Amino acid sequence: MKPIQVGLLGIGTVGSGTFNVLKRNQEEITRRAGRSIQITMVADLDVERARSVVGEGVQVVNDARAVIANPEIDIVIELIGGYGIAKALVLEAIAAGKHVVTANKALLAVHGSEIFAAAQAKGVMVAFEAAVAGGIPIIKALREGLTANRIEWVAGIINGTTNFILSEMRDKGLDFDVVLKEAQRLGYAEADPTFDIEGVDAAHKATIMSAIAYGIPVQFDKAYVEGITKLGAADIKYAEQLGYRIKLLGITKRVEAGVELRVHPTLVPAKRLIANVEGAMNAVVVQGDAVGTTLYYGKGAGSEPTASAVIADLVDITRLHTADPLNRVPHLAFQPSALSDLPVLPMSEVVTSYYLRLRVADKAGVLAQVTGILAGLGISIDAVLQREADEVAGEGATQTDLIILTHDTREGTMNDALVQMQALPTVLAPIARIRKEELA
Ligand code: HSE
């Protein structure tokens, strides 16, 4: 049978990995796909570098539109990234009747609905396993492996850069800024790490997972996004003393009123497997009503791990290429006509438990004032930790840290409590608030 012909837009780290793995494992991949899959055309602005990766026998151009216009190309892989030109090219490829494979989480989280609708109308597939957690086949698991389940929640470490930074902060007791610089020096963090450290990259991925888990449209604009830049080494240390680790989690939960979709630093019990995922590794926990808890772990980035996901999509498309579009797996796991309008809840409606750290004057009645405010708002305390002032703030200190863990509380109520506590003259610095999830 004639090989499936693939055009690659952008041959950087992931593109090179895709080319190399496809070539190296050609024989096994063909046995699985039923047809040979060949990258026959590559577009990259740096033609020289692209040529040095693919050698002779592959057409290299500097114009992505030449790939889309080539009638021999069956599948276009988009590895350019971002929302700009990548969006135009993906839509043009779909309009030209090409199937598309993309690793572009930003594009799908923001413009996914438009892209999937265009693909649906044209009868082509858009595959995006590489967009979430790199090499971990979490899209496949959520969309197909767990299809019997009512998914209850998904919680994941889905950004390797921030997990590396948090691991280093905990291991070495260092502050965020110091570790970020080290992560940049080692190549774990980009020169402009904003999307990673501010939680945006994780929120793109969580948005995609929420759509597949619950059959709702992708709604990045409704996600609550908080990164790790304000996290102090002290909080990591106190969390540990209380039996928790702090991880940047992407969380999506189905509750009675709708769907929670949020990314923020989170205290997780140290005994949970996910709390022990260290360095740049990724992991996702999925809770389904039938299967219970499942955990997926692996590399969330990198040349060949991400290529592994890209090629899995190429194989899927090759197998289903000639199938009636109605019999293919829907992009968002649910039939497009059966998507739900379950609302994504505002953060103020989210219910979770909290870790609070208050720098307070070490004098009589302070604890009573603070707990009085919590009691007044119906917030139940789960644990309190207070160290001697000398130990916290040095010999002879007159202030100390008061750490409080609460039971489940509505975020809006906690916001009110924070305003009241912050106004106390005995609270001497901005209160640290970190959400806590038992993931039981
Ligand atoms: N920048 C991402 C991370 C990898 O640090 O995990 C690509 O999504």
Image (tube, grey):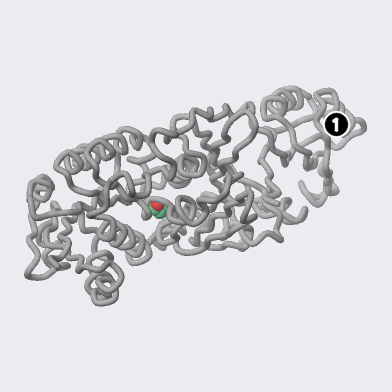
Residue 178 seen by the camera: no
Residue that numbered label 1 is attached to: 371
Task: Kindly identify the residue that appears in the image at 54 percent across and 51 percent down.
Answer: 148
Q: Is residue 10 left or right of residue 261?
A: left
Q: Is residue 282 left or right of residue 74?
A: right
Residue 367: image x %, image y %?
87, 34
Q: Position of residue 306 (x, y in %)?
A: 35, 61
- Left or right, residue 193 beside residue 256: left
Q: Is residue 352 above or below residue 348?
A: below
Label 1: state its secondary structure: helix
Three-letter code for the amino acid on which mark 1 is drawn: Thr
Label 1 Cα crowd, 10 Å radius (few <14 / some 14-19 / many 20+): some
Task: Classify 5 as above or below 339.
Answer: below
Q: Residue at x 14, y 57 (%)?
A: 42
- Give the quadrant of residue 255: top right
Residue ID at (33%, 40%) = 107
Q: Position of residue 68 (x, y in %)?
A: 12, 47
Left or right of 245 in this view: 280: left
Residue for point 71% across, 54% down: 269
| Res 379 → quadrant | top right
The quarter in which the N terminus is drawn is bottom left
In the foreground, 388 or 368: 368
